[in-house]
Image (cartoon, rainbow, N blue to C red):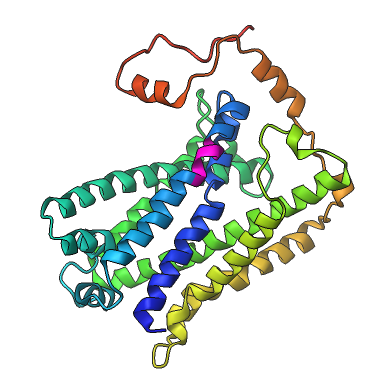
Amino acid sequence: MPTGRFEGFLAALWAASFCIVGPEYISMVAGEAKRPRTYIKNAYKTVYWRYGIFFILGALCTGIVVPYNDKQLDEVNNGSGAGAGTAAASPYVIAMKNLGISALPDLTNALLVTSIFSAGNTYTYAASRSLYSLAVQGQAPKFLRKCTKKGVPIWCFAITMCFPFLSFLAVSSASNEVLTWLVGLLTASGLIDFIIMLITYIAFYRATVAQGIDRKTLPYCGWFQPYQTYFALAFEIVVVFVTGYRVFLPGNFTYDTFFTTYTMVGVAPCLYVFWKFFKKTKIIPSKQVDLVWDAPLIDAYEASFISPPTGFWTEMIQLIGLRRGIKDDVRNV
C-alpha cells in the first residue's frame, strides 16, 4: 500500500476510534448537569450520529476529493508547501479548493475557527475538572480543591489556562519543535485514556453480572455489550501502535519522533504499577465493587424537580433569546 494511501486509511481509522469512544467528555459533565439521568442519556443517544457524520463521513468525503498523491497535500505534509503550518494546510481546505468553488475554502476556515473555539472550551472544562477530581481523591495537592461560590475550581482553572500560552511556541521553528513533542505526547495520552475507559467499562460490566444487576434497569444501557467494548479496545490498541508508523519507514527513524510517539505507551503502565505499589491499593473483586454509591442522593435530587425537562431545540431557541420563560429547574424544596 503506498504511503499516502496508508495515511488516508490511518486517518479513517483515527476518525472511527473517536466515534467509538468519543463520549468521554459527556460523562465528565454528568456531575454538573441539572438532570444527569435525562440530559446525559439523551446526549449519549445522539453522539453516535454526530461523531459518525462529522468524523467518519467527513474523513470519507475528504478522502474522495483529495487523492493520496495530491501535490499540495504532499508539499504541506513535507513542510515545504505554501500554507504549511496554517489553516490552508487543512485537508478540508484543500478539498474545497479541489472542488473549484471559491467561497468554500473561506467558509471552511470560518467553521474551523468555531470548531477550535468549541474544542478549547471543552478541553478547558475537562482539564480543570480532571485536576479537581485528582485533588478530591488525594492524588493532587489539596489547595486545588478550592472552588468559587458558583462551584468553579478556581486554582485548577488558573493552572489549566497557563497551558494555552504554549501555542506561542509555534512562532519560531526552534520552539515549534518543542510544541510538536508536546502534541505527540498528548496525542498518545489521549488514546491511552480511551483504552483505560474501555477497560474500566469491562470491569463495570463484570461487576453487574457478578452482582446480578440487570443493566436495562439503569438510566442508559448500551447495545451489543460487552462485545462492542472488546472490539473498541482492540481497535484502540491497534491505533495507539500504528499512529507513529512513519518512524518505522526506511530512512525515517529518529529518536525524538519515536519517543514522543511511544513514550506514554510505556509510562502509563509504569505509573499504574507505581501507584499500586506506593499506595498499596488492591484490585477490587467484581462482587465487592460498589455499584450503588450516591445513587439514592441522585434519585432524591431528580425527584425534587416539578418542571418538565426542556428539549434540545428549546434550548437552542433560548440561546437567541426566545422562549426564555420556559424553565426546567423548578424544584420542590
Give how far across and how far down residue 48 sits, in percent.
51, 46
Give how far across and how far down residue 132 sits, in percent.
58, 41
Foreground residue, 292 or 57? 57
Q: In this image, 264 relative to 230: left or right?
A: left
Specify the quadrant that holds the N terminus: bottom left
Q: In this image, 19 relative to 78: left or right?
A: right
Q: Please, what is the dominant secondary structure of the magenta stretch?
A: helix
Foreground residue, 323 or 142? 323
Q: Is residue 32 above or below residue 57?
A: above
Q: In this image, 211 relative to 165: left or right?
A: right
Residue at 55% x, 74% y: name it.
241
Q: Is residue 24 visible?
A: yes
Q: In this image, 278 relative to 198: left or right?
A: right
Q: Quadrant of residue 26?
A: top right
Q: Which stretch did the figure color magenta?
A: 43-48
Q: Is residue 242 magenta?
A: no
Residue at 59% x, 37% y: name it.
145
Specify the quadrant that holds the C terminus: top right
Give how far across and how far down residue 309 sits, in percent.
53, 18
Seen as rendered, the residue at the extreme top is 332
Q: Quadrant of residue 237?
A: bottom right
Residue at 87% x, 41% y: name it.
212
Seen as rendered, the residue at the extreme left is 102
Q: Is residue 86 visible?
A: no
Seen as rendered, the residue at the extreme bottom is 251
Give how far across and how far down residue 151 sits, in percent.
53, 28
Q: Is residue 120 above or below residue 237?
A: above
